Image (cartoon, rainbow, N blue to C red):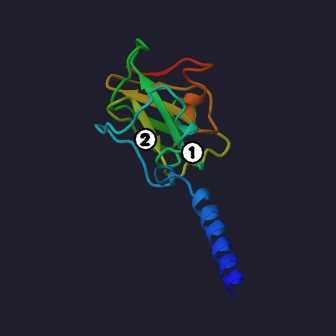
Amino acid sequence: MSQKKNLLVMLLLRLSVLVFSSCEKENGANVKNISSHGSNESHNMGKNCMECHKSGGGGKGWFNIAGTVYDSTKLATLANTTIKLYTEANGGGQLKYTFEGDAKGNYYSTDDVSFGDGLFPSVQGPTGTKYMSTSVKTGACNSCHNVTTDKIWAK
């Protein structure tokens, strides 16, 4: 009996280690996390947010769109912008999604975004709107901008 009891205890101990070691960090769960005008919870401006904010990453929530907007000097971030995704270039077609940038210049959302065959982004600052001329099929904006292409900026 003692041998069976020891075997059962060992089995339960190993099972517990397996279960608890495979769990993600608590803050890495897919919880709602959406930027808004005036909020300042974000960090790591200019970095690819989706390196951490993804399944298996340590970031709070799994982002479907995220990026950073700069002012026209491209040296400082621009607070409280608005990002819109359209079905056609230059704000044409149907407006599919609208996202608010925060006080640190970042915008992000865990809400579902269906890029389909591609959507055309715009960014609105306090004095104007800029349009991206090509469509995107991913919301990892900083994976290209500030890496292989110019920073996202507005006035």
Horizontal side of 29 relative to 34 (left or right) equals right
* Among the two numbered marks 2 and 1 on one chain, the one whose residue lies closer to the N terminus: 1
- The answer to whether any part of residue 93 appears in the image is no
- Residue at x 33% of width, y 28% of height: 79
Image quarter hosting the N terminus: bottom right
Task: In the rendered structure, find residue 99 and report the number of the disc placed on it.
Answer: 2
Q: Measured from the top left, where is residue 90 in percent x and y?
A: 53, 29
Horizontal side of 30 relative to 147 (left or right) equals left
Q: Measured from the top left, where is residue 16 in percent x and y?
A: 60, 67
Image quarter hosting the C terminus: top left
State whether residue 149 is above or below residue 50.
above
Q: Residue furthest top?
A: 73
Q: Nearer the viewer, residue 141 or 128?
A: 141
State whether residue 140 is above or below residue 146.
below
Q: Measured from the top left, where is residue 13 in percent x and y?
A: 62, 69
Horizontal side of 85 relative to 56 (left or right) equals left
Q: Which residue is mark 1?
A: 57
Q: Residue furthest left?
A: 38
- Residue at x 49% of width, y 49% of height: 61
